[in-house]
Image (cartoon, grey):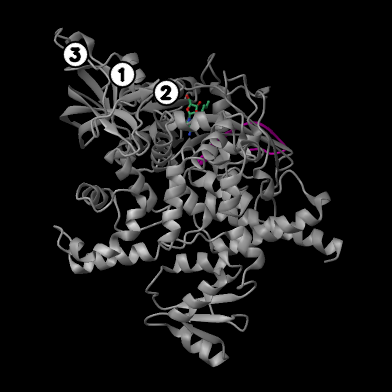
Amino acid sequence: MEKREAYRRIQELRRLINYHNYRYYVLDSPEISDEAYDALFRELKKLEEKYPEFVTPDSPTQRVGFKPLDKFETVSHAVPMLSLENAMKESELMEFKNRISRLLGVDDVDYVAEPKIDGLAVELVYENGTFVRGATRGDGYTGEDVTLNLKTIKSVPLSLFGPPEAPPIPSRIDVRGEVYMEIRDFETLNKQREANGEPPFANPRNAAAGSLRQLDPNVTASRPLKIFCYGVGLVEGYNFQTQWDVLQTLKRWGLRINDRIKLCDNIVEVVEYCRNFQEIRGTLPYETDGVVVKVNDLEKQRILGEKTRAPRWAIAYKFPAEEAVTRLIDIEVQVGRTGALTPVAVLEPVNVGGVTVRRATLHNQDEIERKDIRIGDTVVVKRAGDVIPEVVRVVKEKRKGTEKPFRMVERCPVCGSKVYKLPDEAIYRCLNVRCPAQIKGSIVHFASKGAMDIEGLGEKIVSMLVDKGFLKDISDIYRLKEKAEDLERLEGFGRKSVSNLLHAIESSKQPSLARFLYALGIRHVGEHMAHILAEHFGSLDKIMSASPEELTAIPGIGDKVAHSIYHYFRNPENLKLIRDLFELGVRVIEEGASEREGVLDGKTFVFTGALKSMTRSEASRVVKALGGKVASSVSRNTDFVVVGENPGSKFEKAQKLGIRILTEDEFMQLVERGRA
Ligand code: IVH
């Protein structure tokens, strides 16, 4: 491609990617498939590699790949980031309104009501539409420069949309917003952390703050952060009239705005909004602790002005926390996949915000000591959204003196072996690799969705199969087919469900390298890390023989992770497990390696009808791993159409165009050959 043409294509690709990014991350309504998006991204990456002189800091390729910092620089906010006064009751909202009408000499004004997201406040500085700097709120006057970390958040645009789609971009605008983590993402992250022996975050807000304030941007990139923008600081070259105007215009420039904001005509509508919002807050994907109410007219805001720390034109209406008081009957100890022991509070059942709570996590021994929680205590329990309930504090006034301090068990409650606390960890562990709790946990993990994805091997079934002696370690999964008849006799298992399970097990035998690595359950190797490793090394052999130095040389991999990987592959038991899996027919698809010499190189596949031995997405993975492509419709560029049961119109079209048709078996043969 000629250089000038390449430049034009680069510009075009960036425009397209930014647009689809916006559809996906800001509007939550994508227009193209993930594959199509990835293709655009890859094309841009390739062109930029060929013409590095065209790379700009706001290119969509420039979100990741930065080295860890030694420390954050401090930056001062051009306009201070104030905090808000709170209204704890509806009557305090009325007082807020009365003060405003008195100061302005009017009856009432219009307001914007916005969800108050529980995360951390940041400022994004855009110069001529390009994101140049971002900082935390800090003390309101100066914050920490977290530019590189903010860049990794996909809903933070690296450049704003300008005309003709949107209003002219100001020469400088400081956008304010809240970085947060959705509740489900928070829970997944905590599960991973507990599995890795890392202390879990107490709540989504701490998780968001901890993730954004990482010196290594690669860590931030691996955390599922989002942003909602809610205001502006310094603005040069644009005149907003109202807060509503601010929000709508920010949205048109491509910034992410909460869609539950409401323009209210008067305080009565605001109160109504607050009541409604309180009702539905438990159904939202994120945590909120209230509603922010702002005078809409910016001129009126200016007249009202501010006190030392907070403006007179806004207030935070706070919801009562979803808390309840109950008795802590006992503290049990749970054993996880890595042997981590987690104390769990057994509670007298209590209703918290409409849900009955019976158990609450106590995280670890240190946490129990810090909060001085004793068995028999009266405690305050909190439940936030879908988050695992937690013991907030003890009501010490209710103590009778009969309460018993918790002592960590000396022996594993599951296998009875001695437990240990490793020097640099907050938690105790059972170190017996044969502990049934660990065996169960590691099998469940191995079979889980992001790993080998074996449907039907969830917690309950695995627990039963381990207890009944069918599974003694991970590799036994692939020996189950020899015991089909015995399985059929188990309670709750019929011929059909056994056949489904065995089928799911068979079709899990060709994992990608990343999935396989993740499935092994190596400490500190989560899904993201597994992908980094797979991409970098391209083959299991290379990973297995990598030295700690080779591992730490990879961005995103620190000493702890490198150490863990290195030692995992030096442990004879682990090596035996891998050997056994291979002997039992597991074949890792080595993407990097096979892509280069893939037999399906450049070939395009279309699937129609249901496949028996794998799902569509597994089939796509296999094709891609061997260098092929998968398309959703048949055209002259299609090389093969794979026909499963009840094929659709694609089958006819393929026949018409004379495209090579493969049965599922033929496809499997082709794939097998590809791997040989
Ligand atoms: S406005 C002067 N709007 O709440 C205006 N704040 O105590 C101050 N927050 O630090 C902020 N959602 O972290 C505003 N829609 C929203 C908000 C919001 C969350 C947080 C923000 C701020 C704190 C105010």
Asked whether residue 118 appears in the rendered view, the answer is: no
| Gap between marks 3 and 2 measured at Cα | 26 Å
**CB within 8 Å, label 1 to label 3:** no
The residue type indicated by label 3 comes to: Lys
Where is residue 331, by image quadrant?
A: top left
Q: Quadrant of the C terminus?
A: bottom right
Disc 2 secondary structure class: loop
Compared with residue 486, is residue 546 higher up or lower down, i.e. above or below? above
Q: Is the magenta stretch mostly helix, strand or loop?
A: strand
Which residue lies under the disc numbered 2?
422
Of pointers 1 and 3, the one earlier in the residue sequence:
1
Count of numbered circles on the image: 3
Disc 1 secondary structure class: helix
Position of 152 with respect to 111 (left or right) is right
Q: Is residue 274 magenta?
A: no
The residue type indicated by label 2 comes to: Leu
**CB within 8 Å, label 1 to label 2:** no
Compared with residue 400, is residue 26 higher up or lower down, i.e. above or below? below
The residue type indicated by label 1 comes to: Ile
Residue ID at (52%, 87%)? 654
Q: How crowded is mark 2: few (under 14 residues within 10 Å), some or many (20 or more)?
A: few
Of pointers 3 and 2, the one earlier in the residue sequence:
3
Where is residue 233, by image quadrant?
A: top right
Disc 3 secondary structure class: strand
Stretch of the chain drawn in magenta: 223-240
Which residue lies under the disc numbered 1?
368
Q: Position of residue 15 (x, y in %)?
A: 69, 56
